[in-house]
Image (cartoon, rainbow, N blue to C red):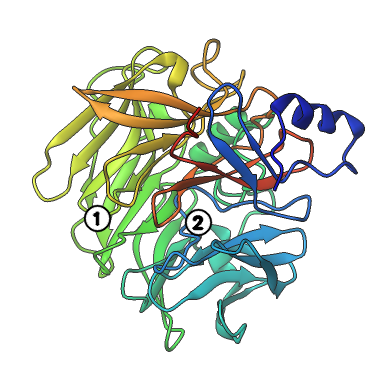
Amino acid sequence: MKKLSLAVCLASATFGVAQEPPREWTDPATHHRIIRLSDEPGSASLYFHQNAYTAKGDLMVFTTRNGISVIDLHTRKIRPLVEGRVSDVVVGRRTRQVFYFKGDAVCQTSLDSGETRGIVTKPELRSGSGLTVNADETLLGGSFLEGPTPQASPPSTATLQPHGDNYPGKGEMMERRLAARLPMALYTISIKTGEVKTFNHSTDWLNHVQFSPTDPNLILFCHEGPWHKVDRIWTIHTDGTGLRKIHTRTMDMEIAGHEFFGADGKTVWYDLQTPKGKEFWLAGVVLATGEPIRHRVERSEWSVHYNVSPDDKLFAGDGGGPNSVAAPGNGQWIYLFTPVNGALKAEKLVDLAKHDYRLEPNVTFTPDGKWIVFRSNMFGPTHVFEVEVEAEKP
C-alpha cells in the first residue's frame, strides 16, 4: 500500500467529513508508521483500562455508531459483532467473550461465533461504573447507586467515553456530585448464574472499577471527585475484605489518579502531581510490599492517560490539549516512555497537533507489544488508529 506524506494526509482533512482519512502513513516528525484501523466515522477504541484484546492477540474490539465491531489484527479485516447501542465494553482475556451493557441487560458475545447470551437484567447496575471482568472470567464487577437514581444525576466518567472527560462545566459537575454524597456500593455478577452480590456500601462516589489481570478476587477502584479533595485510589477483595488505600497525600493540592494495574497485576500505576500542575510523575505501588515507585515526567510530556506494555517494561501516554492540567506547555503527541534512572525518557510517536482533546486518545498496547492503539479526530471524524512502536529505518 502506498504511504502518504503527512502534508497530504492533513490536506485531506480540509475537504470535510466526507473525505476518507488516509489508511496508512509515516509521521514525518517521528518516522513511526500509523495505520487507520476503522472504516466507519464515529468508531472509537475502548477506555484506557478496558481490555479490548484476546489473550492470543489476534482480535480487538472497538465501538461504532451501530454497536461493536471486531478486527483481526493480523489481516485488519473488520466485521460487525453486536448491533445496537452498548456501553461499558470489556473483553475477557481467556474465553474470547466481550461483555457489555445493552439497555438494562448485561450481555456477553463470542468474538468467534457471535453467539450472544444475556447474563442478568438489572437497570440499577448502569448507574455507576462498570463493567470489568476478572482474571478467571467467573465474575463481572462495577459500582452502582443504591436506591432511586436522582433525575439530575450526572454520568460517571466511564460512561462519558468516547467523548472524553474534557468538556465545559466538568469541574462544576464534579463538585456537585461529590457534595451530593449519594449512597453507592460495589457489585459482582456471576457470569455463569447472573447472581449479583454487593459490598463496600458508602456515600463516596465509586468509579473506575477494574479487576486485577491476574488475581480474580482483587478489585481496583477510585473515590471519584476533584482529585485534590479525595483519597482516590483503593483496592478491595470481592468478598468485601481487605479495603486498602493505595496512595496517601503528602501535601496540599497533591493529586493522583487515572490508576491502572501493571500487566502482571503486581503494581498499581497512576498519574501523580506534587502539587497539581507543578511536578509530574508516573507513580506506582508494589502491592505485595507497599514499595513506592516514581518516574519523573517532563511537563511538556505529561499525558492525560498512561498505559503499560505487556512485558511491563515500557509505558505509553496520550499527551494533553490546551485545556489539560499541564497546559500551557503540554505536548499534543502519542508518546512512548522508557524508564531511565527515575525518569521517563520520551519518544514522540504521533503528532496530534490537529487533535481536539475533548476526545481523549486513550492509548493501549497490543498484546504483542508492537503497536499502540488510540482514537483520534485529527482528520475530523473519530477513528481508531495504531502506531508502530519501532520507528521505520531511514
Query: Residue 182: horizontal and vertical position, in percent?
Result: 50, 50
Residue placed farthest to the front in the image? 394
Please tell me the numbered disc located at residue 247.
none
Please say if 191 is above or below 259.
below
Q: Is residue 118 visible from the viewing direction of this image?
A: yes
Frontmost residue, 155 versus 11? 11
SS assignment at label 1:
loop
Amino acid at pointer 2: Ser
Q: Residue at x 40, y 18 (%)?
A: 276
Frontmost residue, 364 versus 2? 2
SS assignment at label 2:
loop
Please tell me the numbered disc located at residue 264.
1
Q: Place residue 74 in its image quadrant.
A: bottom right
Q: Name the residue carrying label 2.
A: 129
- Relative placement, left or right, of 156 versus 259 is right
Question: Alpha-carbon distance for marks 2 and 1?
Answer: 23 Å
How many numbered circles are shown?
A: 2
Please say if 259 is above or below 169.
below
Sooner in the amino-acid sequence: mark 2 or mark 1: 2
Amino acid at pointer 1: Asp
Q: Report crowding for label 1: few under 14, some 14 to 19, many 20 or more residues within 10 A (C-alpha).
A: few
Query: Residue 358: horizontal and vertical position, in percent?
Result: 66, 32
